[in-house]
């Protein structure tokens, strides 16, 4: 810090005194003047700075700069002569120049301060918010209106990144693009809506120094506009919308009196405007309680209420919602749906789905009916299996729906757009099955491709895989391991990429023990076993299954059966269903064939005779406690059912065959087989 001695305490000395006093790099050691009452002398005494009437007293002090403002040239020359060489002696003329420069600077500084204060005053009295950032995206200015709109203070964010102040700010983008964004609608962090303009700040040399945003809060403007909008115009518009709707609509006021109805409402209920407008909300109700009044009381929407309306007692479903304006209940709006129309649309939709399903010959998991824990577990496992390339083994009794599961697994897999083929491994002889599966190189068969080749990139369902011969099992194992198939009579293998789904109703573990099934093939196909429960294991699904079967058969037989009586359903629930869902479909089919055209419900009398004990099987009046083999039980049921239908058709063989949907030749065979006269 430089040590300064000022000689002369008049006007010039006083100015320099004040200048150096404000300078951090300069320290005034003393001020000297012959007149102890000079202005600068008084100032120095007040600030505890040394004063003196003789400058020569300071010759031997460590003085860096001596400023002579006495105006006496001989004093200047003596100072040069007496002070050390290192001390800088500034004459009065130079001191005056410094004074003038300092005075000018002070004047300019004061003007800048005045202008800055004036600008700050203007910015803080603007009705628009303003934010200014530098090129480093740091907040430099936040005016008072911006503080009000944002709910934040400048002192808390000045110097911080703009994103800390406002996450939605686009000033960073404006800095990068150096392009204006004018009159853009923006939603702030606090939910307020503003119209903002953002402009980059570029100096005279073309350098980017920052950017600023000016924005106006339009939330209040929008609210004001909404409050002052012509309500009659809005009412007219709403009435036009309501009356043009195909949905039946009624509107009531806060007292529950009718305000508006539309033509669709009149068509549905048969009531005109004269009968509804200004009348209580109960005027259109034939059966049930007013949903409008309930909504007006609870201030909550109500949906899906069944009731009857109008003179024709039209069956409808009603949805009603309250109209609340600024916290006050102003009325409610109701929409009525014709139940009969909904039912018709639903039926058409189901019919369309069924047609599509038949065209695709595909089933999905939506086609598998059942909510029992056993069926849910099987479905979950199957859905997991569908997403993996592993072999799936479907285990379950005959008629449980293994093929349905196989279709669904394929449809849910990434192979669903390729072929799905099914083969019953017990329906063909060994030689025919081998050619069917693996193909043939025989020229007479025109090098026929087997099912594995046909299903390449798709899926193949090997039903009743437990009935394969050991020879075919060995060949199948090779295909599963190598992903190659060798056609019968060929030597060159053909590569295949096929997803295998297997199904069986036998105990494969027992078959392995008895050497009827290869152990290595068992482990190959048993990686993802899924047990499909029998019908007697999930009897809680029977009502749902019956409803589904009735719907399907209505489409097939052209019937309009709506359901089943409790007595008939109870009879089905007590039966043990050895033939599972397949047998149930047969029983329901039998009942619907002989139901009257005017009847809409399956009664217990329509059902064929069913045994309710699982451990006994009857033929006539003879019962045996020992359970029969499944085929024997099915044969007995087929005989009983055949006799019943034959009697109902008055022993007309042509009519009986038509009802059973089998050929007359097949009917003769079965009559002879069971010795039915």
Image (cartoon, rainbow, N blue to C red):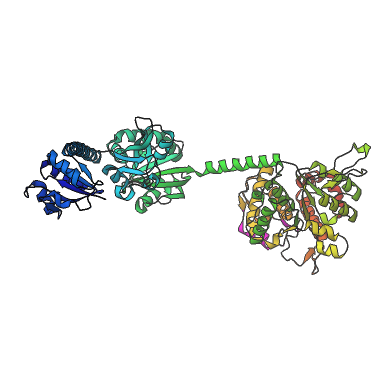
Query: Residue pushed farthest front?
Result: 81
Q: Residue at x 29, y 45 (%)?
A: 147
Residue 611 pos. (x, y %):
73, 62
Give the camera-side residue of 619 and 551: 551
Q: Which residues are magenta?
A: 564-580
Answer with left or right where residue 308 lies relative to residue 100: right
Answer with left or right where residue 400 lies relative to residue 202: right
Any part of residue 251 in sight: yes
Give the camera-side residue of 416 and 115: 115
Q: Residue at x 61, y 43 (%)?
A: 350
Count of number-bearing discs = 0
Answer with left or right where residue 451 lies relative to residue 145: right
Answer with left or right where residue 124 lies relative to residue 378: left
Q: Is residue 566 magenta?
A: yes
Q: Is residue 591 above or below residue 211?
A: below
Give the camera-side residue of 341 and 25: 25
Q: Is residue 474 magenta?
A: no
Any part of residue 19 in sight: no
Residue 538 pos. (x, y %):
67, 61
Residue 26 pos. (x, y %):
23, 48
Q: Residue at x 14, y 49 (%)?
A: 55
Give the camera-side residue of 267 and 630: 630
Residue 176 pos. (x, y %):
43, 36
């Amino acid at each position: 810090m430089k040590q300064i001695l000022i000689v002369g305490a008049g006007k010039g000395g006083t100015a320099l005194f004040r200048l150096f006093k404000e300078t951090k790099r300069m320290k005034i050691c003393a001020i000297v003047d012959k007149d102890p009452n000079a202005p600068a002398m008084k100032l120095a005494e007040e600030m505890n700075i040394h004063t003196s009437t003789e400058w020569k007293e300071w010759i031997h002090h460590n003085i860096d700069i001596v400023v002579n403002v006495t105006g006496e040239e001989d004093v200047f020359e003596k100072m040069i002569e007496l002070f050390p060489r290192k001390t800088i002696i500034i004459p009065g003329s130079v001191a005056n120049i410094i004074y003038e420069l300092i005075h000018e600077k002070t004047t300019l500084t004061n003007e800048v301060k005045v202008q800055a204060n004036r600008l700050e005053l203007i910015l803080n009295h603007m009705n628009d918010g303003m934010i200014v950032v530098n090129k480093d995206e740091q907040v430099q200015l936040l005016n008072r209106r911006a503080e009000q709109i944002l709910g934040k203070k400048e002192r808390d964010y000045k110097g911080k990144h703009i994103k800390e102040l406002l996450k939605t700010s686009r000033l960073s983008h404006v800095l990068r693009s150096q392009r204006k964004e004018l009159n853009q609608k923006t939603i702030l962090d606090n939910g307020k809506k503003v119209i903002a303009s953002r402009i980059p700040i570029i100096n005279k040399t073309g350098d980017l120094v920052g950017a600023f945003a000016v924005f106006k809060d339009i939330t209040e403007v929008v609210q004001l506009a909404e409050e002052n909008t012509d309500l009659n115009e809005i009412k007219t518009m709403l009435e036009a919308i309501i009356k043009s709707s195909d949905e039946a609509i009624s509107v009531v006021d806060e007292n529950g009196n009718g305000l508006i109805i539309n033509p669709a409402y009149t068509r549905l209920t048969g009531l005109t405007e004269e009968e509804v407008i200004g009348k209580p909300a109960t005027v259109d109700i034939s059966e049930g309680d007013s949903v409008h009044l309930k909504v007006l009381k609870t201030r909550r929407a109500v949906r899906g209420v069944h009731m009857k309306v109008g003179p024709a007692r039209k069956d409808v479903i009603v949805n009603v919602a309250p109209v609340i304006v600024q916290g006050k209940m102003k009325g409610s709006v109701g929409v009525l749906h014709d139940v009969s129309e909904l039912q018709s649309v639903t039926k058409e939709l189901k019919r369309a789905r069924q047609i599509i399903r038949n065209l695709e010959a595909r089933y999905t998991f939506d086609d598998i009916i059942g909510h029992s824990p056993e069926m849910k577990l099987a479905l979950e496992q199957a859905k997991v299996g569908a997403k993996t390339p592993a072999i799936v083994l479907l285990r379950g009794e005959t008629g449980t729906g293994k093929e349905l599961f196989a279709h669904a697994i394929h449809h849910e897999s990434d192979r669903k757009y390729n072929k799905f083929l099914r083969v019953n491994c017990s329906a063909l002889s060994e030689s025919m099955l081998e050619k069917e599966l693996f193909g043939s190189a025989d020229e007479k068969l025109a090098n026929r491709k087997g099912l594995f080749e046909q299903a390449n990139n798709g899926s193949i369902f090997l039903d009743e895989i437990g009935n394969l011969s050991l020879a075919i099992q060995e060949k199948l194992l090779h295909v599963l391991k190598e992903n190659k198939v060798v056609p019968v009579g060929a030597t060159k293998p053909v590569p295949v990429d096929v997803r295998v789904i297997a199904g069986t109703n036998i105990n494969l573990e027992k078959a392995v023990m008895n050497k009827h099934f290869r152990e290595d093939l068992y482990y190959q196909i048993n990686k993802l076993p899924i047990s499909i429960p029998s019908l007697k294991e999930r009897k809680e699904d029977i009502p749902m299954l019956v409803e589904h079967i009735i719907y399907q058969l209505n489409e097939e037989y052209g019937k309009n059966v709506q359901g089943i009586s409790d007595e008939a359903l109870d009879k089905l629930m007590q039966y043990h269903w050895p033939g599972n869902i397949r047998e149930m479909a047969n029983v329901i089919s039998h009942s619907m064939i002989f139901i009257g055209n005017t009847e809409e419900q399956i009664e217990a009398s329509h059902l064929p005779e069913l045994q309710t004990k699982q451990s006994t099987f009857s033929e006539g009046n003879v019962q045996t406690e020992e359970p029969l083999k499944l085929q024997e039980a099915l044969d007995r049921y087929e005989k009983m059912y055949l006799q019943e239908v034959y009697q109902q058709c008055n022993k007309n063989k042509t009519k009986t065959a038509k009802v059973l949907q089998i050929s007359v030749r097949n009917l003769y065979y079965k009559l002879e087989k069971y010795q039915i006269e």
